[in-house]
Image (cartoon, coloured by chain):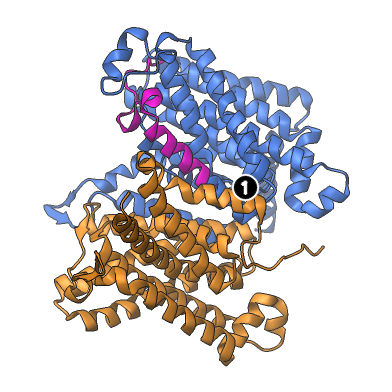
């Protein structure tokens, strides 16, 4: 098949219809069960956050490890503003909630966007001093900030309920909330990457000095990429809060960021489609790996290796193996497009007759 | 605030600061040579604490032999880490090496959780280190008292190695210019291994002294000290050994002083290091004793 504009449109529509059908079937409980739905929703959230992290790390070349902190901001914003007023006193039973906050209840969508905006605002404030630094200092500074955010949330009991966390966050009835937002977020980031801003980001990634010499305002573009990344991480955090219905500071320990690091390394630093595929592979994979955490009995023999903790060992080994041996991940900096898929099929087709001819 | 309490906390601050200094030397040396934040350094420190527990509690070694065994085991682990996680990536982009370092750190903590479970263990009570002595009106454990001296002796030793020996000269050459040093016939791998040997040995000594002060060890105990000590190294001027020790002292002091004077902010104890980091990077990114490095095109 030849890829032209018309065919591409048809294929895109077909893909979207297939995607929509699966979601509708899942939503109406025709296929799957709550567990599968939950894992898929989580994958969608991870896809948002990973794509946002890839925007900063893969496309702009800034090694930022602050994703968990920005997610915490988004998650807490949703948690604080969407819990029904009637439940507030029950949740904040040790330290009463701040009287102003205790009267505000916002619809989910507004709280979600507010969470993203707050995360972006914090990112701008952090970015001003930190983005002037070299990549490795940036890594430790962003990691530090994500820890500070967590520490602040643990200590501001009248706002965040401290270490107890916030429970009974209203949940969303449909998977479209997660997948719709994911689609939208990825689309926006895709547009951004293919705009002149995106080209500036990539120029900064390849060579800062050269980019500056070409007239790219380094600081402006770095802050922009960083804060947009934080915005979508905040959105992802907000979605996570409503998916889990509960937030507490320990969820956002900085090792949480390593999940997204694994995803973008697997998918390829600088590849959106790779990141999306990797988000689903890693999230589903982590669920499947739970098998390693429970004791295993094979033919009546108890295999001693299988006990809690093995899953995370495999997870971290995977990250090491990936970066040591498959540094480019699935797609490197390439994107998966219809043309690539088509070329791949065509090459296979062409190969077969050639081999036949020789025989 | 009584002057007695103040003196007590001052001693604690100096002692904590010198523990940070021991770890910070490891960070600063590796960074000076490889330009790499060795994220796994804190976890090497954690493993050393576990080695100490096992050699005393499980293998019933006397403490002086145990210390030697622990140092050797930790050094072996550090060299192994370098060989497996960093050496294959020597020509790779910086970001890949850093991800490898993070992966190694994460692997160590997860491996420790898996092997030793997340339940905190008691650190063996080494009588020589935990006995309390009275100095003037304050009482301190021997560990608290001798830590600053041990740190200073070790600092002197490290300075001697880097400034007066042949391998030290090679280390300085590699840290100044990696490529040229290689061309001049310096065995880069040997230099880097030596750096990791020194760093890990100091981490092992730090872990033993740390365990005697805070006798509860767990798989994630190395993460926070690790990050803080890197910050101490940045504060002192990364690549500068003396600077790392000064940075460690300042960090330890400010933490203890925060707790002493503003007890209501104790919850923010771990945040102070990061605030210091941001201030340093804003005001003097090269640190207190660091040299200015300009980017070459």
Q: Give the residue at mark 1.
A: A269
What is the quadrant of residue A51 in the picture? top right
Residue A145 magenta-highlighted: yes
Left or right: where B180 falls relative to B19: right
Main SS class of the magenta portion in the image: helix
What is the quadrant of residue B180 in the picture? bottom right
- What is the x, y in percent for residue B142? 25, 72
Foreground pick, B217 / B277: B277
Left or right: where B125 falls relative to A108: left
Residue A182 visible in the current orientation: no
Residue A146 magenta-highlighted: yes
- What is the x, y in percent for residue A97? 36, 18
Q: Which chain is painted in orange?
A: B
What is the quadrant of residue B215 in the picture? bottom left
Disc 1: host chain: A
- What is the x, y in percent for residue B169? 62, 87
- Image height check: is B272 above or below A152? below
Q: Which residue appears at 22% of the width and 51% of the height?
A: A307
* Apparent colour of chain A: blue
- What is the x, y in percent for residue A286? 38, 42
Q: How dense is the environment of label 1, judged by Cα within 10 Å: few (below 14), some, or many (20 and up)?
A: many
Which type of secondary structure does the marked residue at label 1 adopt? Answer: loop
Q: Which residue appears at 69% of the width and 44% of the height?
A: A60
Query: What is the magenta range?
Result: A144-173
């Amino acid at each position: 098949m030849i890829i032209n504009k018309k065919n591409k449109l048809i294929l895109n529509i077909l893909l979207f219809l297939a995607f929509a059908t699966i979601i509708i079937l899942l939503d109406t409980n025709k296929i799957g069960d709550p567990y599968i739905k939950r894992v898929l929703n989580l994958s969608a959230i991870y896809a948002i956050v990973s794509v946002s992290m890839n925007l900063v790390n893969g496309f702009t070349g800034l090694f930022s490890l602050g994703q968990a902190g920005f997610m915490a901001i988004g998650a807490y914003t949703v948690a604080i503003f969407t819990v029904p007023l009637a439940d507030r006193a029950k949740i904040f039973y040790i330290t009463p909630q701040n009287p102003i906050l205790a009267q505000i209840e916002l619809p989910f969508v507004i709280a979600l966007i507010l969470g993203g905006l707050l995360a972006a605002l914090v990112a701008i404030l952090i970015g001003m001093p930190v983005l002037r630094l070299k990549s490795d200092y940036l890594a430790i500074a962003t990691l530090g900030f994500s820890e500070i955010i967590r520490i602040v949330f643990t200590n501001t009991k009248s706002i965040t309920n401290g270490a107890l966390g916030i429970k009974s966050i209203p949940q969303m009835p449909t998977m479209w909330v997660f997948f719709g937002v994911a689609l939208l977020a990825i689309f926006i980031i895709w547009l951004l990457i293919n705009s002149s801003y995106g080209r500036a980001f990539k120029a900064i990634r390849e060579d800062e000095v050269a980019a500056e010499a070409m007239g790219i305002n380094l600081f402006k573009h770095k802050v922009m990429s960083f804060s947009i990344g934080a915005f979508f991480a905040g959105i992802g955090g907000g979605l996570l809060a409503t998916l889990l219905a509960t937030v507490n500071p320990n969820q956002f320990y900085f090792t949480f960021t390593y999940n997204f690091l694994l995803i973008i390394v697997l998918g390829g630093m600088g590849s959106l489609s790779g990141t999306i595929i990797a988000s689903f592979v890693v999230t589903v994979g982590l669920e499947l790996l739970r098998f390693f955490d429970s004791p295993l009995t094979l033919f009546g023999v108890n295999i001693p290796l299988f006990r809690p903790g093995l899953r995370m060992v495999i997870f971290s080994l995977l990250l090491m193996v990936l970066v040591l041996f498959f540094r480019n991940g699935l797609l490197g900096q390439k994107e998966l497009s219809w043309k690539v898929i088509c070329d791949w099929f065509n090459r296979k087709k062409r190969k077969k007759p050639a081999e036949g001819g020789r025989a | 605030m009584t002057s007695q309490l103040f003196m007590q906390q001052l001693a604690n601050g100096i002692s904590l600061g010198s523990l940070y200094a021991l770890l910070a030397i490891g960070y600063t040396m590796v960074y000076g040579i490889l330009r790499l934040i060795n994220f796994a350094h804190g976890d090497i420190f954690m493993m050393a604490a576990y080695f100490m527990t096992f050699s005393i509690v499980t293998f019933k070694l006397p403490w002086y032999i145990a210390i030697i065994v622990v140092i050797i085991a930790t050094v072996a682990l550090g060299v192994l880490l370098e060989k497996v996680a960093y050496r294959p990536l020597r020509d790779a982009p910086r970001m890949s090496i850093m991800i490898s370092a993070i992966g190694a750190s994460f692997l160590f903590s997860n491996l420790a959780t898996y092997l030793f479970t997340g339940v905190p263990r008691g650190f063996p009570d080494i009588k020589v280190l935990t006995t309390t002595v009275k100095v003037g009106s304050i009482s301190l454990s021997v560990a608290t008292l001798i830590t600053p001296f041990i740190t200073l002796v070790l600092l002197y030793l490290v300075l001697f190695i880097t400034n007066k020996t042949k391998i030290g000269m090679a280390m300085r050459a590699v840290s100044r210019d990696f490529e040229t040093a290689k061309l001049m016939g310096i065995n880069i791998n040997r230099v880097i291994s030596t750096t990791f040997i020194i760093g890990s040995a100091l981490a092992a000594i730090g872990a033993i002294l740390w365990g005697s002060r805070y006798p509860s060890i767990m798989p994630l105990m190395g993460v926070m000290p690790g990050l803080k000590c890197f910050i101490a190294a940045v504060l002192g001027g990364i690549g500068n050994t003396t600077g790392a020790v000064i940075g460690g002292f300042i960090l330890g002091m400010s933490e203890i002083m925060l707790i002493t004077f503003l007890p209501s902010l104790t919850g923010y104890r771990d945040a102070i290091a990061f605030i210091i980091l941001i201030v340093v990077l804003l005001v003097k990114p090269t640190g207190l004793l660091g040299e200015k490095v300009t980017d070459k095109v």
